[in-house]
């Protein structure tokens, strides 16, 4: 049963500290093992990938060709979908694309009166690697959420890696790949996939940026290859935070909390409310709703061990605690949710009002569902087109322009003891 905590109790500080540490992954514990796998990929390429698949995914590729998902298989998967499911995929695609197009930064150039010019050039990376999980569940939605921002950004080469335990791959994921016009999909998972995309193998191309969530081995591998490639973030187990008052519907809150709990035993579901009655009602509704879930064992373990309902003296305290938690997903289920919005400082995605459940953001609303977890919303942002772009500063000085600011530039260089810097400017100045 989900535990109920009171912010006014004597042991609340230690209980809350435990919640704040919910997303801590012991990366140090697996780092040496993951580094070993990465070194093998770097040294042996495809043969190391094949060995890793034999060890972890319970099947043995006969050759490097077995790692490749044929384009025809993706097309076949798409064509075999029902019209209803195709329509749903297309609706999701269109909404996600429209939202991310609005996030696209633009190059700009601005001329000064003296003829000098400053600006910024925005260009896409040449290639992107998308990691799509496939262990406890398959996530075609993650393919759309990672691929579409890359497409909008203008990335020309998109590589997808996904684990295939027992050599089985989710057909809906393949259909989503076809919809996104992705040609390179590889049956490789875990740290091996991250290494293959970071360093390149005989079959899997090296990419410039790797995005997508995964388990602790994937997260550790992303951390270790950062610098050789860019990454989006180090993502941990999924989580939801909810702020609610007495006006909230306990049935809605219960199933919303369980929507994260069913992801993974390590997922966190936290409700903060100023209503004791609501807290008790939600606790009871969770027990009822649990019985109807297909993934009941996973959800129950998550909600019992990593879930919590916190009772606060008022909504201001609820907001204060939630800002400390900095959840991946935050639902505001109060009578006037917009009144609290300006007080929210840390959250990956914010869902306002009782008709905005978190799953609407997972699939079809438009904003990205690849979000910072474990409190990293204090400094990370959701996956967006910007993760697939790079920016170059533009500078062009006219003769008049360098004469206007060159003397001061040379003085600053001289002060730092960089004589060549100083002379590089002075030699261009009028005497």
Image: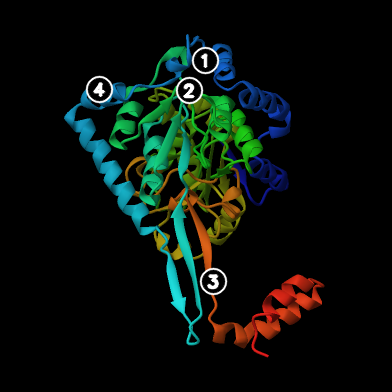
| 417 vs 350: above or below | below
Task: Quadrant for the C terminus, please.
Answer: bottom right
Location of residue 312 in the rendering, given as x and y in whole percent from the top left corner: 58, 53
Q: Nearer the viewer, mark 1 or mark 3?
A: 3
Mark 3 element type: strand
Reading the image, the residue beneath label 4 is: 76
In 3D space, how far apart are the residues under numbered discs 1 and 4 (Cα atoms)? 24 Å
Residue furthest left in the image: 83
Q: Is residue 368 left or right of residue 208?
A: left
Mark 2 element type: loop
Reading the image, the residue beneath label 3 is: 395
Q: Is residue 123 visible?
A: yes
Circles 1 and 2, Cβ within 8 Å, touching? The answer is yes
Location of residue 309 in the rendering, given as x and y in whole percent from the top left corner: 55, 42
Q: Is residue 96 left or right of residue 314?
A: left
Task: Quadrant for the N terminus, please.
Answer: top right
Q: Is residue 422 left or right of residue 191?
A: right
In 3D space, how far apart are the residues under numbered discs 2 and 4 (Cα atoms)? 20 Å
| 430 vs 38: above or below | below
Reading the image, the residue beneath label 2 is: 163
Q: Nearer the viewer, mark 3 or mark 4?
A: 3
Mark 1 element type: loop
Depth check, front residue: 232 or 87: 232
In 3D space, how far apart are the residues under numbered discs 3 and 4 (Cα atoms)? 50 Å
Query: Could you tell which of marks 1 and 2 lies nearer the N-terminus?
Result: 1
């Amino acid at each position: 049963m989900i535990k109920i905590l009171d912010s006014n109790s004597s042991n609340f500080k230690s209980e809350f500290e435990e919640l704040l540490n919910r997303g801590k992954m012991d990366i140090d514990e697996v780092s040496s093992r993951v580094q070993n796998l990465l070194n093998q990929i770097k040294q042996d390429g495809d043969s190391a990938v094949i060995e890793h698949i034999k060890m972890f995914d319970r099947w043995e590729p006969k050759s490097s060709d077995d790692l490749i998902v044929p384009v025809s298989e993706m097309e076949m998967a798409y064509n075999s979908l029902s019209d209803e499911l195709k329509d749903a995929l297309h609706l999701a695609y269109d909404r996600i694309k429209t939202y991310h197009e609005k996030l696209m930064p633009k190059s700009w150039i601005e001329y000064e009166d003296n003829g000098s010019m400053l600006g910024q050039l925005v260009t896409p990376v040449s290639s992107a690697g998308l990691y799509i999980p496939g262990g406890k569940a398959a996530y075609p939605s993650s393919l759309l959420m990672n691929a579409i921002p890359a497409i909008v950004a203008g990335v020309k080469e998109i590589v997808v890696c996904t684990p295939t335990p027992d050599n089985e791959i989710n057909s809906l994921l393949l259909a989503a790949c076809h919809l996104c016009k992705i040609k390179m999909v590889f049956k490789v998972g875990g740290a091996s996939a991250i290494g293959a995309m970071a360093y390149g193998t005989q079959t899997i191309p090296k990419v410039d940026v790797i995005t997508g969530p995964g388990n602790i081995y994937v997260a550790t591998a992303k951390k270790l290859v950062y610098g050789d490639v860019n990454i989006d973030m180090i993502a941990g187990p999924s989580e939801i935070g909810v702020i609610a008052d007495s006006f909230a519907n306990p049935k809605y809150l219960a199933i919303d909390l369980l929507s994260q709990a069913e992801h993974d035993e390590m997922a966190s579901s936290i409700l903060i409310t100023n209503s004791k009655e609501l807290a008790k009602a939600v606790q009871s509704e969770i027990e009822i709703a649990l019985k109807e879930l297909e993934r009941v064992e996973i959800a129950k373990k998550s909600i019992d061990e990593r879930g919590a309902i916190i009772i606060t003296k008022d909504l201001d305290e609820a907001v204060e605690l939630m800002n400390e938690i900095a959840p991946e997903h935050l639902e505001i289920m109060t009578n006037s949710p917009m009144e609290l919005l300006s007080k929210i400082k840390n959250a990956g995605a914010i869902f306002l009002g009782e008709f905005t459940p978190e799953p609407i953001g997972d699939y079809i609303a438009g904003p990205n569902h690849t979000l910072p977890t474990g409190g990293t919303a204090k400094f990370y942002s959701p996956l967006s087109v910007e993760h697939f772009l790079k920016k170059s500063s533009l500078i062009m000085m006219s003769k008049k322009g360098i004469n206007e600011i060159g003397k001061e530039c040379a003085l600053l260089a001289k002060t730092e003891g960089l004589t060549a810097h100083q002379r590089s400017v002075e030699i261009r100045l009028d005497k």
